[in-house]
Amino acid sequence: MTIKKQIWPLLILLLAVILRFNGYANRLNVSVDQGRDALIGLESIHLLRVPLLGPPSSSWGFNFGPLYYYFIIFFTAIIPGIFSPWIGFTLLSVFSVFLAYLIGLQARGKTFGLLLSLITAISFAELVNSANLLNTSLVSFAVFLSFYAASAYFKSQNKKYLLLSGFGVALALHAHLQALPLAILLLSPWLLSRAHQILPRIHAVLLSLVGFGLGMFPLIIFEFQHSLAWSKSLLDYATFGQYRFYTPVRWLTDLTIFWPSRFGEVLWGSPALGLYLSIFVFASLAFYAFRKKLDKISLLTILAFILEILSLRNYRGPRSPEYLVFTHFFIIYLFALAVTFVIEGRRILTILVCLLLFFAGLSFDRSIYIQKSQSAETLSLLNFVKKQIGKPVSLQILSGSYENAYSLFYFLSRSHLISKNGYPLALCDNGDKYGLVPDRCPASDRLFSTGRFVLFDYRPENRQKFNLFEIGTIDPLRLYKRTYNNYELIKY
């Protein structure tokens, strides 16, 4: 391709970078799970050992797969600076925009590729997800990767993409079981193959399954070493654990409220717009699908989306945003496809619609940069230690103060400012009492306060004031070993 032909994809990629890194330090999610996972990745590097399990499920006694941790380890090792794992996951979000262009290009052509990548670049939910370090954040990239491999195989019939597609499915399932409907891609080579004989199609499906097996290899090792303990924990959840939860759902509510709201939330961060967006998508697909001939990648996407609708209908747990990351790709794809059907072959209309989407995206995305996470306060604590104390510290955590404690400990560790024999500090989190008088933390002898988070001098002569609190410490090795807590008889 010439440079002229590549200019629009490059501009969209540049837009994705700008939107994802704008106000970056104020948007990072540095809560409990994020800091814990960053520390486990760092400890894995220190131990020269990788875990065979991923983070524990909050629903029941099983763990997800470890590929998420392998990504963290990789980014921590190769990207300099204290934000390395967060930056790595943001770069995956940027790469997803490029994959979106390739998927659209291979499925229906350049117009669809540009539109799909543009909508991915400005998607409200994708922007929010890009600043998060969480196993569910990896699901979005894994879905884009899987469909890229499927579309590349459909276009080229090159069998190496079957291995990549299977691996992408494994990566998504490692990250979170919300991606289970993606398993349909393991059988998709039968649909996407251009071979007329049965044996080549069977061979294509088997290659996809081999790629899946390669992705599942760490868990396969764990299963062989521990008598199928992981499979048994999943079976226990399916037959018993899931019934601890109950979220009332019905088809009418799902189809008229939940799914329309998801369209609005994913595209523009506005559930109120979702009804209009979903009606447009349904009407456009119903009207144009047969007139303009639905390509096989779009058909496969619709089939997987229908499976997702059925899967969520039978999911008994809470429907919080992190458990719905899997829906991002499908909503973006279907909206882009619906718009493409309308504008395809009409150059002026295409330019006007792209400009409208661009400015609408910028307008709705502004709220992302207004709402600040606790990362700025956490970095203020780090800077205080750097500039005012100027030497390694030991960090004690007052009870109920772990919201940002793991991330602060991680930042201090990466800055070489943590030592068991360092200057003793205690961290207190005012939590929901922030701004009240009195707040939750002791009022006297505060070394530094951001408002919500407070650092205290924890030398022996000052410890009496903390008698009302339980004092905890952070041990990265213990966090690493806790990965196996759901399997108590197993030694890491």
Image (spheres, rainbow, N blue to C red):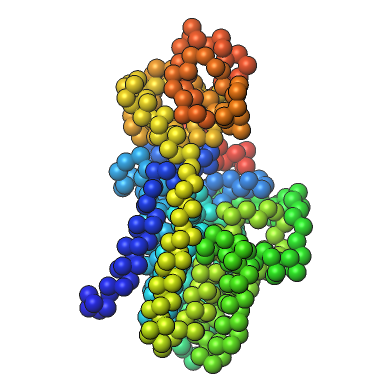
**Where is 20 relative to 143, above or below?**
above
Across the whole image, how many numbered discs are drawn on residues? 0
Residue 395 % position (x, y) = 46, 23
Report whether 51 appears left or right of 4: right
Residue plotted at (63% across, 46% down): 58
**Where is 159 relative to 236, above or below?**
below
Name the one closer to the observer, 332 or 366: 366
| Residue 235 sits in quarter | bottom right
Residue plotted at (49% across, 25% down): 454
Residue 348 % position (x, y) = 38, 84
Residue plotted at (60% across, 85% down): 286
Residue 253 in sight in this render: yes
Q: Where, quadrant-wise, is the N terminus in this rendering? A: bottom left
Residue plotted at (59% across, 55% down): 321
Name the one closer to the observer, 342 or 6: 342
**Where is 27 relative to 415, above or below?**
below
**Where is 135 relative to 35, above or below?**
below
> Which residue reaches farthest left?
3
Residue 491 in sight in this render: no
Residue 255 % position (x, y) = 70, 70
| Residue 290 sits in quarter | bottom right
Report whether 280 appears left or right of 104: right
Residue 220 % position (x, y) = 53, 55
> Which residue reaches farthest top?
461
